[in-house]
Image: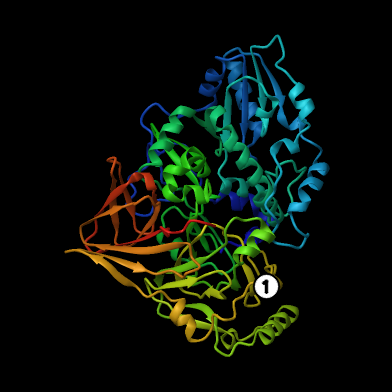
Amino acid sequence: MYDIAQAESNNPASADKEVDRKPTLPQNISNRSDIAAYDIFPFHKLGSGKIHSGYDGLAAWMSGYDAVVIDGFNGVFWAVVQHELDNAFERIGKRVNWVLAADFMRAAGEIDRMVQPFLGSGDSVWGTKSTLQIQDFFDMDAFKAVRPAEGYDLNIVVGTGATLAGWEAPVVYIDLPKNVLQYRMRAGKATNFGAARAEESGHMYKRAYFVDWVVLNNYKQQLLSKIAVMADTQWDQSVNWLLYPDLADGLTKLSRSVFRVRPWFEPGAWGGHWMQERIEGLDKSEVNYAWSFEMIVPENGIVFESDGNLLEVSFDCLMFHDHKAVLGKHADVFKTEFPIRFDFLDTWDGGNLSIQCHPSKNYIRETFGENFTQDETYYILDAKEDAGVYLGFTEDIKPEQFREKLEYSLAHNEEIDVLNYVQLHPAKKHDFFLIPNGTVHSAAANNLVLEISATPYIFTFKVYDWVRLDLSGMPRPINIDHAFKNLDFSRKGNKVQDELISKPQVINEGADWQLVHLPTHAEHFYDVHRLEFDSTIVVETNGLCHILMLVEGTSLTITTADGTASRFHYAETFAVPAAALSYTLHNEGGQRAKVVKAFVKPDFSQL
């Protein structure tokens, strides 16, 4: 689905302008009017007095200690944090000794050599998940030898990895949303962890995905029990913060009720204009929007609110906090990896996605180090009359001939007639196409696709991209060799219609509701239902986590068994953890509501 080389669409010459027009999470929403449709900044209430704003308050809290550790994710502007706190401490007359974690990191060249085995070849789009630990990036003997200095009111060790100094001191952790990190990287304002300088953005994303995020997510999980304060500095020169027990209470509440992550949006070579025209708050001057990360949990965050102040933490904080409550009977299978993702592919008045496939289970494990593969489905949320989906091969497909044509096209920049090899099926609203790994596919123009898929999202092997350039005028990577090691050429002819286009079945109904099963393929570990109702419908979780979206109607309210009530609008994604036990959906529109529900198959027990 997601193109790891999407950074190729961002011209470094206009990087600052590109960052500036991204929707920025408000630091405070006290003056925001009620949202009557899709909300790009959803949040969860903590109650009054929980989230504090400003460096003065944080400095005052820190002044109650002799020593403090300020740790956090890569991409935080540590110099800004130190400068703003220094000013705050000066205002209250505190003398501070600063120790910089970065001073104890290994040399950038040494780190480059250390991470290189996980990055693949220089021209490869993918690497392999790192087995490194954060300690490997530091001179641990020197770091552990540094101690608080005498003669100061306060000693602070600051920077990513600061806790490794081993000080017996409270930890302030500064989280950073991964979309903000990527914007900073594209603008040349942030680098990879331990790197000396910013590089081409596609390379930085690859190193972040396969090395930085793996190492730092593991480190964050280890730190949770030590954190005293969680902070958010995505506004560059300001901070919102809260005491960790208050965050933990919020995470516990979400793990037993309902939540929505903060979505984010990206342009692309084939992108369209459905979201741009219909979702308030998106930049209307952007060239297009190809993706919405509705719930791609390695990159989304969760936003909390108190007294109008907002604070965002990465979604994995919820999984680290209590993945058993979230995933229920499948917690031991997936552990802290959330298994299902929702995202939009917008080709409305746009172009076709590349002709592509995804890796087999064994291939993704052995080649890229992932635990499970990228099995996908396309749910058509909206479509024009000429919309379609490329899916499966023609009956008379000849693999060798197909490959020859693809390689000739790549070498000579020449178009091919895709319909000689790949089937094109008409697509209309609420159709459901099944794309188990190894299946050739593409979303054609004039769709808004809700992609319901397994969580892995960057392993797309493109074989043909319509001889076009990306948004920066460069060819996008083509991966014919990877693809032909994974393409299933038995998915062709009438078998595609029979096995890869879901046939809805009503499996339960009442006076004004029905439960429709949208069967997935045997390869998919997840299944899909559609809840259709006029007034209300009650749903049991039965030990499963449900991921849902209102796909027809205007809005609904959901009330979970613990009494938590929330409102969601058309096209918004939300999730009900297994521990919620049950929930009631109330239709607020004048027409029948339709809600898609995805969940791991109850009998699934092994990756």
Q: How many tags in the picture?
A: 1
Colour setting = rainbow
Alpha-carbon neighbours of circle 1 within 10 Å: few (<14), some, or many (≥20)? few
Question: Which residue occupies the foreground of this view, 175 or 290?
Answer: 175
Question: Which residue occupies the foreground of this view, 348 or 101?
Answer: 101
User: Where does the image place residue 440, in percent across and percent down from the top left?
Assistant: 57, 76
Asked if residue 453 shows in the view, the reply is: yes
User: Where does the image place residue 127, in percent across and percent down from the top left?
Assistant: 70, 57
Give above or below for 513 relative to 197: below
Q: Is residue 469 left or right of residue 322?
A: right
User: Where does the image place residue 101, in percent across and percent down from the top left?
Assistant: 71, 30
**Residue sitting at 70 percent across and 16 percent down?**
148
Question: Which residue occupies the foreground of this view, 438 or 286?
Answer: 438
Q: Which residue is mark 1?
A: 485
User: Where does the image place residue 410, in percent across and percent down from the top left?
Assistant: 72, 78
Q: Is residue 228 left or right of residue 369?
A: left
The quadrant in which residue 506 appears is: bottom left
Q: Residue furthest bottom?
A: 396
Q: Residue furthest top?
A: 151
Q: Is residue 206 left or right of residue 377?
A: right
Q: Quadrant of the C terminus?
A: bottom right
Mark 1 element type: loop
Q: Quadrant of the N terminus?
A: bottom right
- Name the kind of residue labelled 1 in the image: Lys
**Residue sitting at 41 percent across and 76 percent down?**
384
